[in-house]
Amino acid sequence: MRLFDCMNLLLLLVTLPTSVFQSSSETDGTLISSERPTKQSSTDYGGDSSRAVDGKTDGNYYSKSCTHTKDGYNNWWRVCFDSNYAVSKVVVYNRQDCCSERINGTTVYVGNEFCGAIRYDQGQHVYSLDCNEAVGRVVTIKQQRGYLTLCEVEVYGKKVSGCTLYTALYPVQCTGNEADKKRHIENTTAMFTPVVAGTIL
């Protein structure tokens, strides 16, 4: 009898609680974003995406530790991991020397799961969002309109094993181009056909 592979098993279990896809963790709510690969929608004023995970929380842009996109719509920043993590919270350090209000309305996602939105509060430098152990390999921060500047992003979580639907569909968010992503999704979707005793259902 032909055994179900990881993809087919996911298809059957996708409606079950998240805990079904998790096993024991190798870490427990620790900082997992430091020095990880990053990417952003665009770069302006030298504000490279990697600055948000350099371990420096200085809110002065001219200390060269904050990111900066170009102006426009639907700007984003993301950090990628080498495996699945259950994310407990995301902490965002805002710019302080200028333009702090730009952070207002910024949204945070683990994979495609929404964690929350930042509501700007004058004088507040640090914003923490609870992600309720959402599982994924990518954390994305989005700004619908205007510049996106992040002076540090700290992602806390624990590593989980086993396969998940998100891992199967989106493993190349930081390293692949759009064609790579589309091709992988098409190939993965074709694999989601349950097989029992060698018969395709």
Image (spheres, grey):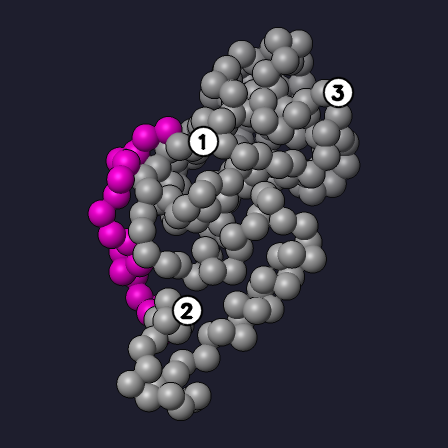
Pick the quarter of the image with the N terminus.
bottom left
The quadrant the C terminus occupies is: bottom left
Residue at the (49%, 49%) spot, across then down: 111
Label 2 sits on residue: 7
Distance from Cα at disc 1 to Cα at disc 3: 23 Å
On the image, the x and y values in percent for residue 129 come to 43, 34
Label 3: few (<14), some (14–19) or many (≥20) C-alpha neighbours in 10 Å: few
Where disc 1 sits, the SS reads loop
Check disc 1 and report the residue beneath it: 33
- State the extent of the magenta-drawn residues as a range: 12-31
Q: Secondary structure at mark 3?
A: loop
Q: Pointer 2: residues within 10 angstroms few (<14), some, or many (20+)?
A: some
* Magenta-colored stretch includes residue 46: no
- Is disc 1 in contact with disc 2, using a CB cutoff of under 8 Å? no
**First of labels 1, 2 by sequence position:** 2
Label 2 to label 3: alpha-carbon separation: 43 Å
Instruction: Identify residue for label 3.
Output: 45
Quadrant of the rendered structure where residue 31 is?
Answer: top left
Amino acid under disc 3: Tyr
Magenta segment main secondary structure: loop
17 inside magenta stretch: yes
Question: For this view, does 78 lie left or right of residue 47?
Answer: left
Q: Earlier in the sequence, mark 1 or mark 3?
A: 1
Q: Amino acid at mark 2?
A: Met
